[in-house]
Amino acid sequence: MKKVLVTGGLGFIGSEAVICLIENGYEPIIIDNLYNAKLAVLDRIEEITHVRPKFYQVDCTKYEETKAVFEENDIDSVIHFAGYKAVGESTQKPIEYYENNLGSALTVLKIMKEKDVKNFIFSSSATVYGVPERVPLYETDPVGNATNPYGETKVMIERILEDVSKANPSMNICLLRYFNPIGAHASGLLGEDPNGLPNNLMPYVSQVAIGKLPFLRVFGDDYKTVDGTGVRDYIHVVDLAEGHVAALNHLATNPGLVVYNLGTGKGTSVLELVHAFEEANGIKIHYQIMPRRPGDIDENFANVDKAFNELGWKAKLTITDACRDSYNFQKKNPNGIE
Ligand code: UFG
């Protein structure tokens, strides 16, 4: 069984990817420093899959301890999820964001080179496209000028990986540009578990739904979109996780450096998502229109043909599925994963 090192493997997306890897005959080995994840996620992965993956509480900016994991395990591929990810926080703590996100990627890449591990998948983001000139976004569209330091770390790491690929043509590197991940595992055991007040739309809506928050603040209704509220490409996290397995299978064909958008190809406005949530769950979501949130863009959605043509992957679950699964997770875990 091929061993796949999953950094940040106890996080929202990482944990779903671990499940998918197990279901597809890979052996995931998780490293996570538990900065933004809980150890209980490991128990839940075991409950779902009946497999308890090997886990190391390791910070992958730390060379020695990360190298020890490679030495103990015959790693075939790495999926690098680990990183700080809060857009707003990154504007307050740029040094920490650059240090942690670049540092962890560089440390892992350095060890991979030393150990001759050739397959690397990177969690990138649609944020690398900055303010889009037009939608849908294609992988060939210009990258750069992210609107915040978090996004800039993704741009920089993509750039580093291009150089690494040029210097090491036998390496296989996949940049996966995620659009907006939402939803949860259908069991309700795993899902998005933010600390404090959620930044992102779906966890906020879910917390309003269970009465933990009084109402949703809709940031702006004067965007150039279908109903004036921001439009994004929301992708179910289980579909997203499957995209990683498809990418991993593709790396086995030695493609060199490849880039894919992982989205649904469809834009949904804030109010459309709220109404879908209400319908899926038979519940009313109270909201108030507020001023725009600084840094937000009107509209952003993916062209997803490349991932379908080259990986044979496309998103299968709907916004309704995601609304149902997010609510189910939130109801079962009103205080997050404990
Ligand atoms: N929104 C609200 N109220 C909220 C939260 C969000 O109205 O309480 C709106 C935003 O204004 C935006 C939409 O909902 O129009 C989506 O906002 P999110 O914060 O959920 O997501 P973003 O599109 O801002 O950012 C997300 C990830 C980033 C990633 C980016 C890639 O959080 O990590 O998608 O496009 F970089």
Image (cartoon, rainbow, N blue to C red):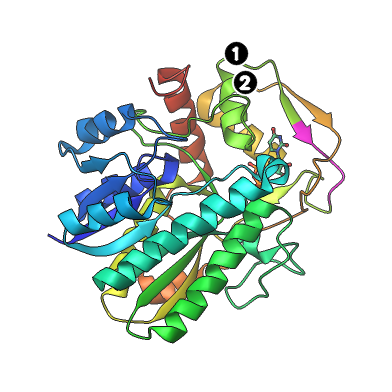
Range drawn in magenta = 218-223
Measuring from the top left, give residue 243's x and y in whole percent. 39, 59
Question: What residue is at 32 percent from the left and 46 percent from the top?
Answer: 31
> Which element is circle 2 on?
helix
Q: Which of 37 and 209 is in front in this view?
A: 37
Quadrant housing residue 273? top right
- Drawn side of residue 284 relative to residue 109, left or right: right
Residue corresponding to mark 2: 208
Q: How crowded is mark 1: few (under 14 residues within 10 Å), some or many (20 or more)?
A: few
Query: What type is the residue that disc 2 sits on?
Result: Val
Measuring from the top left, give residue 199's x and y in whole percent. 64, 35
Q: Looking at the figure, which quarter contains the C terminus? A: top left
Q: Looking at the figure, which quarter contains the N terminus? A: bottom left
Residue 181 in view here: yes
Q: Are marks 1 and 2 in contact (CB under 8 Å)?
A: yes
Quadrant housing residue 209? top right
273 vs 246: above or below: above
Count every numbered label the image shows and give the total: 2
Task: Identify the disc placed on residue 211.
Answer: 1
Question: What residue is at 44 percent from the left and 33 percent from the top?
Answer: 325
Ligand 1 quadrant?
top right
Question: What residue is at 31 percent from the left and 27 percent from the top?
Answer: 40
Q: Nearer the viewer, residue 37 or 292?
A: 37
Measuring from the top left, give residue 297's x and y in whole percent. 77, 53
How many angstroms separate mark 1 from mark 2 (CA)? 5 Å
Q: Residues within 10 Å of mark 2 (few under 14, many from 20)?
A: some
Question: What residue is at 60 percent from the left and 49 percent from the top?
Answer: 97
Measuring from the top left, give residue 78's x and y in whole percent. 32, 61
Q: Which of 302 and 320 is in front in this view?
A: 302
